[in-house]
Amino acid sequence: MNVINVKNLTVTYNKKPAIKGINLDISEGSIIGIVGPNGAGKSTLLKAILGLLPIDTGEVKIFGKEVKSSLKRVAYIPQKEQFDWDFPINVSEVVMMGRYPYISFFGRPDANDKEIVNKVLKKVEMDKYSQTQIRNLSGGQQQRIFLARALAQESDIYFLDEPFVGVDAKTEVAIFNLIKELKAEGKTIMIVHHDLSKVEDYFDKLILINQILIAFGETKKVFTPELLHRTYGGQLTILQKAEQLIVN
Ligand code: ADP
Ligand code: MG
């Protein structure tokens, strides 16, 4: 069954297209990488699928329904710089945000919500920091908290935008292990990623994008010099690195 259907999706900012005519059918239970140069529209694609941006043309369905009626089922970890880390809020309060879709407007978190927050904080090894202000966390700790917030939402689809940027190697391994656990539970995970050296290890399927969809398919079929050329165009330094990686 397809968990996400994207048909002819175009998004423009100030009349300039950021993504054009994207078609995607995403089936459940895989880890999908979204790769392309800076400004290629990777973040725009995620936000548009999530209904966070007005779309110009096209249609997005999640579990066959409008995005609005599936919001609980999709957890989103934005690019880190899009979050105000100076905001005076502590770790457990951030993770509790993952429970908001389950709490009524005038309601308060109940014992079950609190138990889930404690459980996911242990999972990301941040339970000792539950009362720490988020501004005092390292980059790796911040990303663990983001992941905990997403896990607390108990969703079926996870969107992660550059989750490993500014993160220490140990945290990257820990986060990726949790992502693999999610996959083993049949969840679908889409990850914007720019470190081409990890692509073959990390992703079952790959989306290559540069405004238009260059390719979507099994990583071993899509991660080729020719398709990377088409994706990265003139950005030769990145490309040469990629080709070396393929050759080696
Ligand atoms: P990526 O995540 O692949 O780096 P983005 O989706 O962030 O790319 O951006 C795609 C294009 O849209 C870029 O040219 C970017 O400058 C532009 N863009 C992104 N967000 C906005 C915005 N809020 N307003 C105007 N232009 C934007
Ligand atoms: Mg981006």
Image (spheres, rainbow, N blue to C red):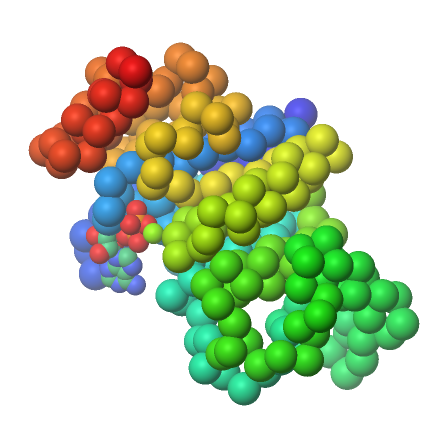
Check the image and report above or below for 167 versus 203.
below
Residue 153 seen in the figure: no
Q: Quadrant of residue 223?
A: top left
Specify whether 172 is left or right of 14.
Answer: right
Report whether residue 218 is seen.
Answer: yes
Residue 86, image x and y in percent? 45, 82
In the rendered view, would you say 244 is above or below 183? above
Q: Residue at x 77, y 83 (%)?
A: 106
Residue 82 at x, y percent in the picture: 40, 66
Q: Residue at x 82, y 70 (%)?
A: 114
Label tally: 0
Horizontal and vertical percent position of residue 87: 50, 83
Residue at the outermost bottom position: 88
In which quadrant of this rendering is ligand 1 seen? bottom left
Q: Residue at x 35, y 38 (%)?
A: 195
Question: Closer to the camera, 158 or 238?
Answer: 238
Q: Is residue 208 left or right of residue 103?
A: left
Tell me residue 116's x, y (percent).
81, 62
* Picture layout, residue 227 above or below residue 65: above
Q: Where the N terminus falls, by quadrant?
A: top right
Where the C terminus falls, by quadrant? top left
Identified at 33% across, 32% down, the residue is: 196
Residue lying farthest to the right in this orientation: 111
Is residue 229 left or right of 106 when viewed as pictured? left
